[in-house]
Amino acid sequence: MKRFKKPRIPLYIIAAFLLGLKTYIVYRFVFNIELDNSMQELILFINPFVSAFLILALGVWFNKSSRQMKYIRYATLAASLLIWANLVFYRQFTDFITIPQLFMGSNMTDLGSSILTLIKPWDLFIFVDAAIIWYLSKKYEGSLAVQYPRSGKVGALAFSLVLLAGNFFLAEMERPQLFTRGFDREYLVKNIGLFNYHVYDVVVHSKNESQRVFADGNEIPEIQEYIKENVDHETSEKMNGVAKDKNIIFLNAESLQHFVMNSEVNGEEVTPFLNELAQDEDTYYFDNFYEQTGQGNTSDSEFLVENSLYPLSRGAVFFTHGNNEYHSFDEMIKEAGYTSNVLHANNKSFWNRDAMYNSLNIDNFFGEESYDVTPEDSVGWGLKDKPFFEQSIPILEDLDEPFYSKMILLTNHFPFELEEEDATIDKFDSNSNTLNSYIPTVRYMDEAIEEFFDELKESGLYEDSIIVIMGDHIGISANHNKAMAQYLDQDEITPYDQVQLQRVPLFIHIPGDGNGKVMDEIAGQIDLKPTMLNMLGIDSGEDIYFGNDLFSDDRKDYVALRNGDFVSDDFVKTAGSCYDRESGELMDQAVEEETDSEEEASEELEKVESACDTIQEKVDTELSYSDSIIYGDLFRFVDFGDEEE
């Protein structure tokens, strides 16, 4: 019988190699990480091995072989679980998990089939290396363990830290101020790796949590001065008071994106009613309106509309800061005699709405207990939109007028399930079941909104109401870009296209107005609060917010996105590059085509870069100030002069 010969390679090195290789494969071929140059390629290849070696090399500090093997086993398994959790999350949101996301676990009970559709059988391959390490550590415990002297342990740790420092040095070269301008999680993962990103996330979370403790309100004057100088609050005289004493019915159109407007599948319009509504003489339709949400999705869109503050880059404000003090739209309209209401056939704890709505001073929340939710009338996340609208009419009729009522739709929600008898348009035919299924649910929502308009007219509420319809966030993530390119009849989806796909429809329908039109100016969800306040004839006074009246001619010339990208009148800034907003070309290419000489091109490009940098500085400042308000709960130090509490 052949005697087992002790291997020369310790288990922690084998485990580090396998973990690093697996992580790189996931980075490169599963996550949709954009790589722009050879330096990024190099860093992306290096960082998983650097992180894996640092994690596993800590095992050499265990003197007993059994403890060393146990550490390596569980460290490898934990790392695999972390990769898998991020992979499942990424499939839906094209993003990476943050610490605040983990506090949103109460939402999981409502996710149901949504999560199941994100788990694939081949996910088991994520755990192959963990299984191999588990087997080896059990089978060859004595021979694969190492017993280094103290100098050897220190040497292994020092070598790990040198590799880590080298990784960080290359990352800082490739992306200066990476850690101080960490709005974009993909850049962090791409440059320092998934595991180091999570360590960074813990540090940032701890820092942010401490901000409220040490905040004293001294930051407020600086923020107010910035807003006074850079965020013009001039409002439209023409639209001032047009909604005075009228009801505002706000439809939060779940996952509705601009790209379906005026588009067809198999010769049929996807949104026939909304297409017609956009051209109605009583409708102002905004076709360059961008969603600005972060990880909070629908709750973030609500936060933007009610406060004209930016959501957080990590987690959902509704969860992490649901007990803060806010100066919301709902609070400000009380002095004008309005009540505020939310109608949503879901439970009150989802997105922590029961706590947050109280902080926003919302008077009534009509949740699932206010509706007759039956299996026949439900699909996916709950009550279908058509019965939701039908059952909501009596609730609206019983409200004291004037009222502000936000209605949150459900049917057009991932995973976009719809029963065959409710589908009146064929699915799209592509390699993405998500995009394919999205088309019938969008059509269903379009039909439901049309029926709701008819029901409002029959109830007598229509003439005395202004109806706002807004897409709350994207429904089709970047993971479906191949299918999206097919839908849009393009060769590919560029970073510029990705930003353009963040456009969502916005309709402001004023019965009897007769002056409606399509508005081409760039705008975002942060602009709704000042717009609706002006329409109601309510003076914003000393309010603190970052949006502009949508109807004002004197507005900011840019829209800030939550990841730090922006859209301006002339540019789209994303993935570290500036694009021409009209053509979608990179600005250096556009400048070269429009100039006659290299010298002229160089001068013009310098001007463009300076203009982009100036806007970027404002965007970063606004996002930072908004974060400070939320993390520090700064409004507790501000007297807005309101009578109501």
Image (spheres, helix red, strand yellow):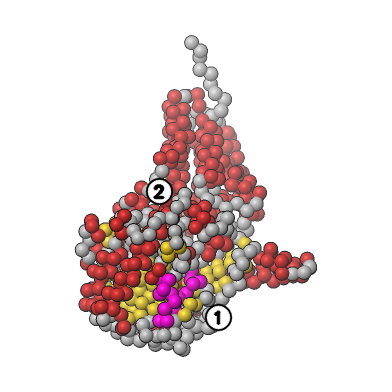
- Looking at the image, tell me whether mark 2 or mark 1 is earlier in sequence order: 2
Report the side of 566 relative to 309 (left or right): right
As displayed, is residue 440 above or below residue 460?
A: above
Residue at image coords 52%, 76%: 520
Residue at image coords 54%, 48%: 193
Closer-to-camera residue (641/314)? 314
Q: Look at the image and tell me whether residue 600 can be seen.
A: yes
Q: Real-space Cα distance between discs 2 and 1?
A: 46 Å
Q: Which residue is mark 1?
A: 229
Where's residue 333, x and y in %?
A: 34, 81
- Residue 634, quarter of picture: bottom left
**Dot 1, crowdedness within 10 Å: few (<14), some or many (≥20)?**
few
Magenta part of the protein: which range? Answer: 274-292
Report the side of 391 relative to 571 (left or right): left
Q: Look at the image and tell me whether residue 643 can be seen.
A: no
Residue at image coords 31%, 59%: 422
Q: Which residue is mark 2?
A: 118
Identify residue type, mark 2: Leu
**Dot 2, crowdedness within 10 Å: few (<14), some or many (≥20)?**
some
Where's residue 206, x and y in %?
A: 45, 57
Residue at image coords 38%, 48%: 117
Secondary element at tag 1: helix
Q: Is residue 286 on the magenta stretch? A: yes
Question: Which residue occupies the extreme bottom position in the image?
Answer: 237
Closer-to-camera residue (316/475)? 475
Q: Is residue 58 on the magenta stretch? A: no
